[in-house]
Amino acid sequence: MHHPPLRLIIFDFDGVIAESIAMKAEAFRETFSFVPEHQDEIVQYHLDNGGMSRFVKFRHIYKEMLYQELTREREEWLGERYAGIVREKMFSIPLVPGALQLLNDVKGRIPLYVVSATPEEEMLEIADRRGLAGYFERIYGSPRSKTDCIRDILSITGVSPEETLFIGDAPQDYEAASETGVRFIARVAPGDQDRFSGKPGVERIVSDLHEIRDLLSPHL
């Protein structure tokens, strides 16, 4: 299929720019250490819903797995506990292979955005401390959905969905791309489950961002 030239690229962050999926899975396990009999189930649910806000996950876990009421105080405690576990690790984990090279290649040529399920304030701090904030026109995070964030970017920039590429690694990323009509490339890390093969609208599945650089070279 022929596409118009790219005018906009949107990145998910975890698993696309930062190699943080395994670390955050273990952080979910540690957050729910008070229910050891449910930890495996909770971690698997977290991995299956990587593009979803942690607070939405907390509510599902309490309702569908623990069968307990999740009070506002308990939800805030879980959020603080999880954030405290991941905060310092996010400042030192490696980037996805090829990520920094791709950002350097594309910066100033195609506007770049981040749309993440991480709380926006936290996402801004991470990008700033990792020296990545300057690559992006804007960084979006939860509580807004990824679909709403992408729609906001398209509205502000006036760029059409056909001229926009979203690079994600979670089913929720694919759903946001489908709902907004933007192009989609999936990143599946070596050894991870491929949840994208055969799905309509998935242009390519890559293992790292070196492959994205090769794909984008005609646009640069």
Image: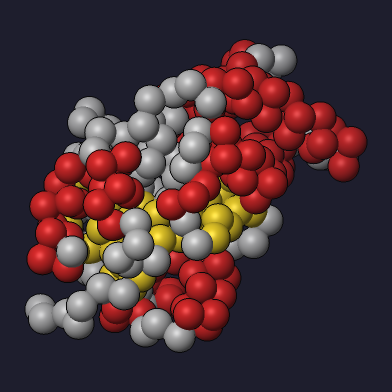
Q: Residue at x 64, y 61 (%)?
A: 144
Q: Position of residue 50 (x, y in %)?
A: 47, 43
Q: Residue furthest front?
A: 108
Q: Residue at x 54, y 21 (%)?
A: 89
The colour scheme of the drawn protein is secondary structure
Badge count: 0
Q: Looking at the image, can residue 133 be seen? A: yes
Residue 209 lies left or right of residue 77; in this view the side is left
Q: Quadrant of the C terminus?
A: bottom left
Q: Nearer the viewer, residue 141 or 202?
A: 141
Residue 99 lies left or right of residue 128; in this view the side is left
Q: Position of residue 41 (x, y in %)?
A: 51, 28
Residue 188 quadrant: top left
Q: Nearer the viewer, residue 138 or 178?
A: 138
Residue 138 sits above or below residue 160 on the image? above
Q: Quadrant of the N terminus?
A: bottom left
